[in-house]
Amino acid sequence: MNALVIGANEDSIESMRIARKYGYTIYAIDGNKDAKGLEAADFSYVVDINNLDKVFEITDKIKADIVLPAPIGHCLTTVGAVNDRYNLPGVGEKSAKLCTDKYLFNEVLEKSSLRDASTFLINKGDNVKEAVESIDVLPVIVKPRTGSGSRGIKIMSSKKDLREWAENYDVADEDYTVERFVSGDEYGIDGAFADGKFYLVLLRKKINTPPPYRQCVGYISVKPEEEQGFYDKCVTLMSEIGKSLGFINCVVHVDVIKSEGDTPFVIETSARPSGHNLSNFFTPKTTGIFLVEEFIKSSMGRPFSYVPTHTEKMMIRFFDLQEGIVEKIPEKEDMERINGILDYNCNIKVGDSLKTVTDGASVMGRGYYLIKADTEQELLDIASEVRNKFIINSR
């Protein structure tokens, strides 16, 4: 049996390990010759995964039985095209396009009354200064039309903010969406569709930096009974969204806001597992379920389950330290002695210059730590204890 990975980033390595356990030979394709997943595969190919013709030249020879779900961005459309070409389980190309295009995503869900974000589109090449003058909804959030990792996302509270943002452009360098900003706590969802039915595996509460970037720097697992009303509404909403986007059998990652009345507002939905050590580490640690493994088992016709038997109270936290030069870092052994810390992985070194966290790329490479406790406040207190062990010269 052959398993294919399209987009062989570091997060795909654990999926390969699981697939190999079930007897698959692993083939990996990536446009970056240094992609860490290429080394972990049995056979690897360096090719632009946006070029379908080049990809099909390889996949026609491989005859894969499954495309392993992996946390990739707009190249999800390539995964969908490959699944369609060989009638494989997983997301199809049409659904993948709706996931990766923020403007089309909103249009489809608006027609089904599942999302109301008053979205404006600024096309590549448009005069941005003129375009923002027609926007009459405030506050708004500006996003590149495609892409992930919170790249280029900013909140604009006033017309002045929009005009200052527009000053950086003569014409738009890519398509942008500008949509009504919805306030409330942000959450992430790891889940899956099986035969069209949605399963919510883990609800994660986000810890975000302040506006304008609001970059996520940590997640806290939510037990269903802690926020049962919101949890149930998320299941209902995602079940309907799945119908609109055409999800049948696929793993999904969702960003959602808890707005007034515990009403979920979906920011984005993608038919892929979450990255940043979530679906391959945090979700299995908290629920015992590895989404990709269950997807593999379902694809093989084996018994599978996306229903957790338990949810542990845990936090995964990234190193969102203050800006400045690192003068002292704590020893790993000392940190692991702190009650509640289950795992500690820090890549920061003395002398490093830390910048303000503005997107996922600016914080994820620093590492993470995993904490277990009885309550959210205990988790936050332990995280503060960890942060206080660092000495940063911010002069």
Image (cartoon, rainbow, N blue to C red):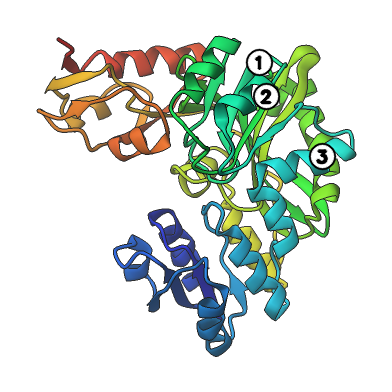
Could you classify mark 2 by the number of other residues whose Cα lies within 10 Å: few (under 14), some (14-19), or many (20 or more)? many
Residue that mark 1 sits on = 184
Cα gap from disc 1 to disc 3, whole angstroms: 20 Å
| Sequence-earlier tag: 2 or 1 | 1
Residue that mark 2 sits on = 257
Cα gap from disc 2 to disc 3, whole angstroms: 16 Å
Position in image of residue 236 (x %, y %): 84, 35
Residue 297 picture quarter? bottom right
Foreground: disc 1 or disc 3: 3
174 vs 364, left or right, is right
Foreground: disc 2 or disc 3: 3
Residue flagged by tag 2: what amino acid is it?
Answer: Ile
Residue at horizontal 20%, vertical 32%?
332
Residue flagged by tag 3: what amino acid is it?
Answer: Leu
Residue at horizontal 56%, vertical 79%?
53
Position in image of residue 8 (x %, y %): 43, 63
Position in image of residue 203 (x %, y %): 64, 32
73 vs 110, left or right, is left
| Sequence-earlier tag: 2 or 3 | 3
- Frontmost residue, 148 versus 262: 148
Give the vertical position of 103 relative to 50 (above or below): above
Which disc number belongs to residue 109?
Answer: 3
**Label 1 residue SS:** loop
129 vs 326, left or right, is right
Residue 158 picture quarter? top right
Cα gap from disc 2 to disc 1, whole angstroms: 6 Å
**Label 2 residue SS:** strand
Which disc number belongs to residue 10?
Answer: none
Residue at horizontal 66%, vertical 70%?
81
